[in-house]
Amino acid sequence: MGKAVLVIDKGGRGNAIAYAFAKSPQVSRVYVTPGNAGSSILEKCHQLPLFAESVDEEIEAMKKYALENNIDLSFVGPEGYLSAGIVDVFLDADLDIVGPSQMATVLESSKCDTKDFLKKIGVPIPEHKNFDNPDEAKEYVKDFYSDNPNENLVVKADGLAAGKGSIPCDSKADTLSTVDELMILKKFGDAGIRVDLERRLYGEELMFFVFTDGKTVKALEGAQDYKRAFDDNDKVNPRSFDGKNPNTGGMGGYSPHPWLDEELTEKVMKQIALPTITRIQDYESTQFGKLNGVEYKGIIYFGLMICKEGDQKNPYVLEINVRMGDPEAQVILPRLKTDFYDISRAIVDGKLNEIHFEWDPTYQLCACAVSGRIGRYEGYPGKHHTNQEIHGLDEVDNNCLVFHNGTAFDEDGQIYTTGGRVLTVVGTGNNLEEARIHTYDNLKKIRFRGMRYRRDIGKIL
Ligand code: GLY
């Protein structure tokens, strides 16, 4: 009997992680919890719908399952379970698990403390200041705009806000009303009690992923992401989203990345990734105090702005996430040739230095099919309908993979939609254009009421 793995995630990233484990000849069973319909369709994989009233109860149920079913290794996708301490609970029960401890997740769960930490250890960040008093924050905004009339600020909620807590502003009035929305109207609840105000940088955004066992840090191949809901050249219906093209969790992407070269990778590793991981014990956390004895193990996803300064491309950290991106995982992991079970084991055992990462040179390009406008609901990322039957999944060909984000089976075995992002369709090709054609040819075969996707992923404009 081969190894049994538990993947903890309910979205498309979880499907991609399960797919990566299932490719390992050492692995015979992959359980995905809470999972979705797609988790049961992948070879060797099974959905384990361990839903409970609270995250803590879900974590207890997952631990119990892992203990009772001789799970060899668990792997956590989203930040919610990590911040709730799933890794500590599993380790206390002597269960092997990939992910950072609860204390180490402050890198994502406190934007304010993390910016102070990065500044202290010399990692490049935009000029910033933290506030827990809205009047003082607004005074700072006024002073900033009178000193810098041609610049702008970004307002960041300190806590977790489902990826929506970072708001780039375009004017003083915009910044002042954003401070009110977060700190007084509590748009993101307690996550906005404290805010980080940052000078807005302009350049090219880069998502940079590493795996680490706390000592060795290995960069993954990059992916280009597409955050806006609609095509760059589309006119957004003025009655939706205030006529703006809103940010989403991600509408598509492709790998390899078009301009992340070896030189920039080395620079990001040396200036950002290595110091962040090796100096985590210098972190002063409002919640936990000094992170003495803490080691960061797992994945880190750095959200960077690459600014052209003279003839240099310089990276600045905008945010840190303690997980892989969705849908970035769906295009990066299918290109990984190294055994994913070996990598995960090495992270747990502190032996990542023994692993050599090999990548398939082919292109993977994905577009997310989302729940779009139906009637008065404007669609993802706004209000959207679910419970729509999905058709055509059995018509897709071998040039693509379909990972599920928000789906479930009904009692007749029919798959229906359960979320805003529904499916990630990943086409493969020897070049970007071929991968693009495979993605879009297959997307045309899939149907559900209200289905919408961006048509410009990977399009060279
Ligand atoms: N795709 C962006 C994220 O996972 O946060």
Image: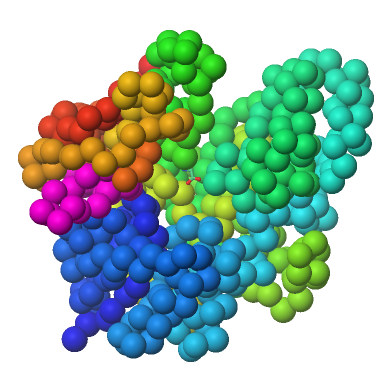
Vertical placement of residue 277 versus 225, above or below: below
* Quarter of the picture holding the N terminus: bottom left
| Residue drawn 76% across the image and 76% down it | 292
Vertical placement of residue 156 versus 103, above or below: above
Closer-to-camera residue (195/269): 195
Q: Position of residue 61 (x, y in %)?
A: 41, 76
* Quarter of the picture holding the C terminus: top left
Q: Is residue 122 left or right of residue 218?
A: right
Q: In which quarter of the view is residue 173 placed? A: top right
| Residue drawn 66% across the image and 29% down it | 168
Q: Please, which colouring scheme is shown?
A: rainbow
Specify whether residue 183 is in view: yes
Q: Is residue 34 left or right of residue 199?
A: left
Q: Position of residue 85 (x, y in %)?
A: 58, 71
Closer-to-camera residue (283/289): 289
Number of marks: 0
| Residue drawn 72% across the image and 36% down it | 185
412 falls in the magenta region: yes
Vertical placement of residue 387 versus 445, above or below: below
Q: Position of residue 94 (x, y in %)?
A: 48, 89
Q: In which quarter of the view is residue 252 placed? A: top left
Specify whether residue 350 is in view: no
Q: Is residue 329 left or right of residue 445?
A: right
Q: Position of residue 445 (x, y in %)?
A: 13, 32
Highlighted range, magenta? 400-417
Secondary structure mostly seen in the magenta stretch: strand
30 falls in the magenta region: no
| Residue drawn 72% across the image and 29% down it | 178
Q: Residue furthest left?
A: 395
